[in-house]
Image (spheres, grey):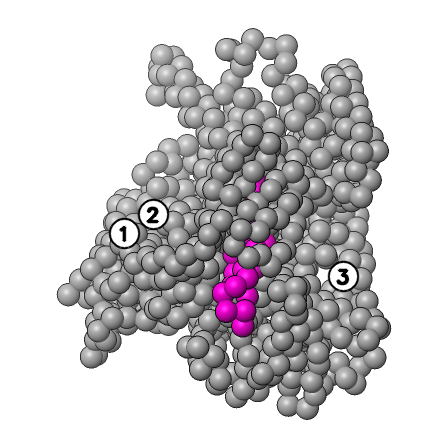
Amino acid sequence: MKQKHQRLILVMVALVALIGAALLAASALREEASYFYTPATLAKAKVEPGKAIRLGGMVQNGSIKRAADGVTVSFIVQDRDAVQTVSYTGITPDLFVEGSGVVADGKLDKGGVFVAESLLAKHDENYVPRELKDIDMSAAEHTKDTLAK
Amino acid sequence: MIAELGLAALWLAATLALLQAVAGFMSWRENGGALTALIKPVAVAQGVLCLISFGALLYLFYVTDLSVLLVASNSHVDKPMIFKIAGTWGNHEGSMLLWLTILSLSGAAIALFEKRLDRPTLWASLFAQALLALGFFAFLLFSSNPFERLNPAPESGAGLNPLLQDVGLAFHPPTLYIGYVGLSIAFSFAVGALLTGKVGPAFARAMRPWVLLAWIFLTVGIAAGSYWAYYELGWGGWWFWDPVENASLMPWLAATALLHSVAVLAVRDALRAWTIMLALVAFAMSMAGTFLVRSGILTSVHTFAVDPERGAFILALLLFYIGGALALFGLRIGSVREGKQFNLLSREGGIVANNIFLSVILAVVLVGTLWPLAAEAMGEKISVGPPYFNRATVPIGLLLMLALMVGPLLRWRSDDGARLKRVIVPAMAALVTGILLFVQWPSAGLFPILSLSLAVGLAIASILPLVGRNLLRTPLTTWGMALAHFGLAVSIAGMATESGWSSERLAAMRVGEEAKIAGWTVTLKNVKPVAGDNWVAIEGEAVARNGDFTATLTPQARQFFQPAQQTSEAALLTRWNGQLYVVLAPVDGDNFDRWQVRLWWKPFVTFIWLGAAIIAFGGFLALIGRARLLRRRKKADESWGYA
């Protein structure tokens, strides 16, 4: 094998690997990336039940209800224009309180309830989930009152 | 006074960095000259001054000097001492000062200890190192001054995020940063070699131990961070594919590839351009990782603060260094002659496979990390999470493991395939394990079953290079390689069992009730209030029974005061075959009648970090082996009168 050929072959192999990586990434992205919705955009979009999506907004005051089993909660996520009911089974994050921001990963069930698999609450003063940055945070003013309960 | 001393030391160090850059550049251009004698002392002095500056900040945090803005906004008089000190780097400015200090110390280390690199390349490398430092001096002094005063001084301070108040903070960031920034040495060497055009085995032998050292720290730092997140967050997970975790994984992948390709360059004088490229990419990934996070573009639990001015500064620095390095590569790589050729069925061929698979994993992780940014620029909000990363990286990881079973058995240059027969044993072991697992636990999932089977095969294959040798005369470097590969098998086995065979249970329990999970019976005996230095908590007393074995676990739900924040402290029971993980939380509105208890049984989960420790130990042995080899060679040279 000539010198030139070896470098050429290695470059070809690297190119093939790169294309393979791009295809793998593209197909995985198409099927696994989840789109972000607020209650208002979710109401407009027709999302089929069972598709993994993210939902972000404010937890409505007075909406957190705990089921009799003690581990399931349901609450309403709102933005300025719409509301969405969410149910979640598990220990809620430390800063999950009414009037604060939340991002939920999960899917819609057939009855239109968003079943969350994980919840991400507003973490501290410096940390806001990036999807919530553009959302009107005026409702978050209540955060401190509820924290002090 | 101390704060001003720290700031003055920083300014002086920055001036010396400028001097070092000029002296290094002139020496390279004129092949020596008047300024050459300055380079080394200046590099060392710069390192010492940065250390003084960092020491000053440490002291300010130690005494909690609240007249310093950074201390006031991140510390508190009531905080336990270890967190006061570790809190030095638990914030943006402090962590950047630590970063810069390690960068300067790396330059000082090159000046003091690097004896093998030819002089012009060394000068050019120290020029590159100083140029790197200058950008970050500017960033720190102009937009992130850690010594800024606050007048009037507050009385108590704002406190540190409770999630960071853990011994993990004392170890994880410093080790990780030594790993990240240690890679700057490889970067500077690569720039130096591009400038002088001297890329060959001697260059590779000089670069190798530095890469190895940084890689060991990076491995330990990532593993420590993973274990910290695992027990501190209380989510039961050990890797979340969070952007910041990816930011530490990407340099590790590049550094691992570099570690292997530099061996090819050192032994066989092949893969010249590729090795240079990897050295540039590895540190570029370190910078991109650290600074994308610091700039606030990627938000995550690791982000301290978001400031658009800083973000722009950081992006400009990134573009300058990474773009500059790539441009230099494009301009100068033509002058680097092509290395020696090799048969594809050879050790070199195996390492090329390793490099390709590692690079592809790196590429898909990079795409997944940056995709949400690209999508947002096009007006869509997308999140890319674990499903993407698992699906895109695991198949390549499996291929990498297959290559790893074969590669270390091959001879350099050209292999006749005779030794490949030995792979039959691990291959059969993997196959049998796979079939057994699939028959016994068909629901465990394809990836966990395949990973665990290949891990078993790899564990056997990794020790084959030692089989049939006189173990006492086997070089430490070979031991190191075998151990590191064995450690990888152990770690992957842990990941596979954790993801395929964990059990989880969530229950609302009254005191006295019990819950069952994976052969364990957990009884909630008692719940009582407890208090620490700066928090109060409710603490559960959970008694876990399995056969004759009994143990008590005490998970807590803590309320911190400064800042006011709740955290849950998970309780972990470690057994040889796994961990029982218990989290306690109050049930809102239940008047403390019932408690939420979340239980996990995670079989062999500790193997993940045990494996990482073995990998790092393997690297450590190889490092000692290299040092010994070097000393022996030097002695031989002396006795022949070459010195």
In this rendered view, identify the residue nearer to me: B537 or B219.
B537
Residue bearing mark 2: B105
Q: Residue at x 28, y 46 (%)?
A: B44
In this rendered view, identify the residue nearer to me: B529 or B419.
B529
Percent position of residue B158, x then y:
32, 71
Q: Is residue B596 left or right of residue B436?
A: left
Q: Quadrant of the C terminus of chain B?
A: top left
Percent position of residue B69, x then y:
28, 72
Q: Main secondary structure of the magenta part?
A: strand
Pointer 1: residues within 10 angstroms few (<14), some, or many (20+)?
many
Q: Which residues are magenta?
A: B579-598
**On what subunit does the disc labeled 3 rest?**
A
**Is A115 situated above or below B440?**
below
Q: Residue at x 74, y 64 (%)?
A: A33
Whether the residues at callouts 1 and 2 have beta carbons within 8 Å, the answer is yes
> For the residue marked with disc 2, what is the amino acid?
Leu
Q: Residue at x 60, y 16 (%)?
A: B466
**Is B282 situated above or below A4?**
below
Percent position of residue B99, x then y:
39, 55
Mark 3 lies on a secondary structure that is helix
The label shown at residue A32 is 3
The label shown at residue B51 is 1
> For the residue marked with disc 1, what is the amino acid?
Leu
Percent position of residue B106, x then y:
38, 46
| Label 2 and label 3 in one chain | no
Tell me the distance, in whole angstroms, between the alpha carbons under discs 1 and 3: 46 Å
Pointer 3: residues within 10 angstroms few (<14), some, or many (20+)?
many
In this rendered view, identify the residue nearer to me: B418 or B542.
B542
**On what subunit does the disc labeled 2 rest?**
B
Q: Is residue B377 left or right of residue B89?
A: right
